[in-house]
Amino acid sequence: MGCRRLEPLRGVPTVEQADAVWLFTGDVVIRLGSMAVEYQPELVAPAGAALRLAGQDGPTGADLPPPLAATIESIDAACGAVPGEHGPVGDQ
């Protein structure tokens, strides 16, 4: 199963894989998904907007800290470098 590069959410690289959206910030990966039977992509943007940095009282809407350069290189190789690209899909 491959992954697909999405438009950045909160200013950080964002990909879709396995019925979830993954945000890469600092040295952390945030998975936005649900336990629901059906994946609901329309809930991703509101969930991303609600994220807050540890120690803050609430979300600010500001961009999240960028990931390390090596992380960005890995994302580009695995999921595509620009939104809409899809990474390689192998037999899995």
Image (cartoon, rainbow, N blue to C red):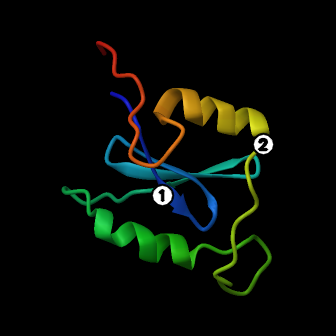
Dot 2 falls on a residue whose secondary structure is loop
Looking at the image, the residue that sits furthest to the top is 91
Assign a secondary structure to mark 1.
strand
Counting other residues with Cα less than 10 Å from the Cα at mark 1, is it few (<14), some (14-19), or many (20 or more)? few
Asked whether, in this view, residue 11 is left or right of residue 20, the answer is: right
- Write the residue at 56% across / 27% down: 77
Residue at 74 percent across and 55 percent down: it is 66
Q: Position of residue 20 (x, y in %)?
A: 38, 50
Which numbered dot is residue 7? Answer: 1
The three-letter code of the residue at mark 2 reads Leu
The amino acid pointed to by label 1 is: Glu
**Residue for point 67% across, 86% down:** 58
Residue 21: x and y in percent read: 43, 53
As drawn, the label of residue 62 is none
| Relative to 79, residue 39 above or below | below
User: In the image, what residue occupies the spot 69% across and 49% down?
Assistant: 28
* Count of labels in the image: 2
Q: Toward which corner of the image does residue 53 lie, by quadrant?
A: bottom right
How many C-alpha atoms fall within 10 Å of the one at disc 2: few (<14), some, or many (≥20)? few
| Viewer-proximal residue among 29 and 3 | 3
The vertical placement of 65 against 4, above or below, is: below
Question: Is 34 situated above or below 22?
Answer: below
Q: Which residue is mark 2?
A: 68
Nearer to me, 75 or 48: 75
Q: Image check: 7 left or right of 59?
A: left
Rounded to the nearest angstrom, the CA distance separating label 2 from label 1 is 18 Å
Q: Vertically, is 40 above or below 51?
A: above
Depth order, front residue of 57/24: 24
| Quadrant of the image containing the N terminus | top left
Name the image quarter holding residue 63: bottom right
Q: Is residue 64 left or right of residue 37?
A: right
Residue farthest toward the left in the current orientation of the protein:
37
